[in-house]
Structures are given as C-alpha cells and as structure tokens.
Image: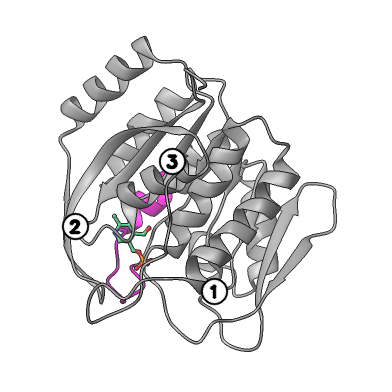
C-alpha cells in the first residue's frame, strides 16, 4: 500500500447534482490515484438541465481555507474551475504568483444549459490577471471566442497564448458536426488536433472532468503531452458510460479506485 499520493488544490463551485464542479474534480482525481484539496469558490443551485443561482463564497473564508491547506500540504498542481466573481479571480491571480505548481484552468463562463456564469468584470480579470499565471487553459470553443472577442477559435487560442497562458486546449464538444475536435495550441508549434467520436447524448460536467483528469496526470508527473492525451481518452470513457441521474443531461461516470 502506498501511503502517499500526489495532491492537487482544486478551486471550483459546488454543484448539488454532483455532475460538475468540485465533485467532478474530486472523483476525477481519485480515479487517477490523486488526492484533491477541495476548496469551494461558490455554492450553486442547479439540476442536470441548467444552473439557477450562484452564490460566491466570502473572500475572507476562501483565502483562509487556501492559506491553511497550503501551509500544511505540498501540492503538485492547481486546478481552477468556476470562480464566484472578479474579486475572487483577482485574489487567486495574486496567490498563484507565489506558487510554482502548474495551473490548469477551465474558464467556466456559461452553463451547458445556457445560464451565463460570468460578468464582463470577471472575464476581464480572468483574461488580464489570471491568464498569465495559467499553464494550461481548457476553454470550449465558445469560451475561447468570448474571452478574446475573436470569431475564430484557432485565432482565439493564439490570442490567449499572446495574453500569457502557456498552453491552450480548445475543446469542441459544444460545436456542431461530425467528430469532436479538440485542439492543443502552444507557442511556436502547429496546433495538435485530437478527434473523438461525437456521442449522441449531451453531458453535464464534461469540461470539469477533462480539466481535472489532465491536472491529476500532471500531478502524477506525466509530461503534458501524455496528460492531455490520456486525460481526453479517460474522459471519453466516462462519457461513453455516463449516468442518467435526472431529467436533463447525463453525468460522466468516474469510477473511483
Ligand atoms: N456548475 C459548476 C459548479 C461548474 O463548475 C460547471 C462547469 O464547469 C457547471 C455548473 C456547468 O457544467 P456544464 O456546462 O457541463 O453543465
């Protein structure tokens, strides 16, 4: 029995369906043999169809939670999902400046069900202050376009690299058409495309699951290329076996070890 595990600091919203947010992070990490430090950024009201309400956690409480676990535990990566507001985003950017661990950020801007989860102030803070601290950003195509104002997702990814994040994986699950095409963009290299069969169902929590699966593999010491490839393959399996828990979209099946 191994008595230690790599640790990832996870900052995400609490989704009471358990499909997305911090539960997705914890399950994806546990399935990979990684321990999550779950710090909740916001409480939400939602079902498997859509988000109805988001209540950010008080900044003083959030910052004390982060300081306390960081003083105690050595982390191998940071995973960021939904942030409650611009103030939290700014605080987190300043905190990340003091850390050396890689940062995987899923810029949750809109719920799959349609509710807008980001104000213009949060988007601007994310773009101008958080992005330069991010190792890998995992927007879906619509998020990449919205963050940059670019109508083309490849151009948007290039702009995101210019704005300071090191790598961008634009996911195509929200686009129409044949295969789902995910594109990994890095400065100075041609984008690398990954093609996955588009499944007939729609899903709640796929983006959180993918970003966490990649973060977990980085925490295990895998090179980024391997983490990105394996994280996608594992996430695809969780979608192929996704569970119908309610009346809306299915949630990924993330069996824990
Ligand atoms: N709620 C929380 C807390 C989330 O983090 C996310 C997405 O990351 C969502 C809801 C929306 O998930 P989806 O767009 O997959 O339905």
- x and y, in percent, of residue 34 in the image: 48, 34
Q: Is residue 120 magenta?
A: yes
Q: How crowded is mark 1: few (under 14 residues within 10 Å), some or many (20 or more)?
A: many
Quarter of the C terminus within the rendering? top left
Visible in this render: residue 86? Answer: yes
Q: Earlier in the sequence, mark 3 or mark 2?
A: 2
- Residue beneath disc 3: 30
Q: Earlier in the sequence, mark 1 or mark 3?
A: 3
- Residue beneath disc 1: 173
Look at the picture and state if 87 lies above or below 178: above
Relative placement, left or right, of 215 versus 222 is: left
How did the renderer colour the structure?
one colour
Residue most extreme to the front: 1
Question: Disc 3 or disc 2, which is closer to the eye?
Answer: 3
- x and y, in percent, of residue 58 in the image: 15, 35
Instruction: Write the residue at 54% across / 82% down.
Output: 199
Look at the picture and state if 103 lies above or below 106: above
Nearest the eye: 44 or 124 = 44
Q: Do the residues labelled 1 and 3 touch (CB within 8 Å)?
A: no
Q: What element carries label 3?
A: helix
Question: Disc 1 or disc 2, which is closer to the eye?
Answer: 2
Q: Which of marks 1 and 2 is nearer the N terminus?
A: 2
Nearest the eye: 125 or 136 = 136
- Residue beneath disc 2: 16
Nearest the eye: 172 or 95 = 172
Q: Which residues are the magenta region?
A: 111-125
Q: How far apart are marks 1 and 3 (CA)?
A: 24 Å
Q: How far apart are marks 1 and 2 (CA)?
A: 23 Å
Q: Is mark 1 on a helix, strand or loop?
A: loop
């Amino acid at each position: 029995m191994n008595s230690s595990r790599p640790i990832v600091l996870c900052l995400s919203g609490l989704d009471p369906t358990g499909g997305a947010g911090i539960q997705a992070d914890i399950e994806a990490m546990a399935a990979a043999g990684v321990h999550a430090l779950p710090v909740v950024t916001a409480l939400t009201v939602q079902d498997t169809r859509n988000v109805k309400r988001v209540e950010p956690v008080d900044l003083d409480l959030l910052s004390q939670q982060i300081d306390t676990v960081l003083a105690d535990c050595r982390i191998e990566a940071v995973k960021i999902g939904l942030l409650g507001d611009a103030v939290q985003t700014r605080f987190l950017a300043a905190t990340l400046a003091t850390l050396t661990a890689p940062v995987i950020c899923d810029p949750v801007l809109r719920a799959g069900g349609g509710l807008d989860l980001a104000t213009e102030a949060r988007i601007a803070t994310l773009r101008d202050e958080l992005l330069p601290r991010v190792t890998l950003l995992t927007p879906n195509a619509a998020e990449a376009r919205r963050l940059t104002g670019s109508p083309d997702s490849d151009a948007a990814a290039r702009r995101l690299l210019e704005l300071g994040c090191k790598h961008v994986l634009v996911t195509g699950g929200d686009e129409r058409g044949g295969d789902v095409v995910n594109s990994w963009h890095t400065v100075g290299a041609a984008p690398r495309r990954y093609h996955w069969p588009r499944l007939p169902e729609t899903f709640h929590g796929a983006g959180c699951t993918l970003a966490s699966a990649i973060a977990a593999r980085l925490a295990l010491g895998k090179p980024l290329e391997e983490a990105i490839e394996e994280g996608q393959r594992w996430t695809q399996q969780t979608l192929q076996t996704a569970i119908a828990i309610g009346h809306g979209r299915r949630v990924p099946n993330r069996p824990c070890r």
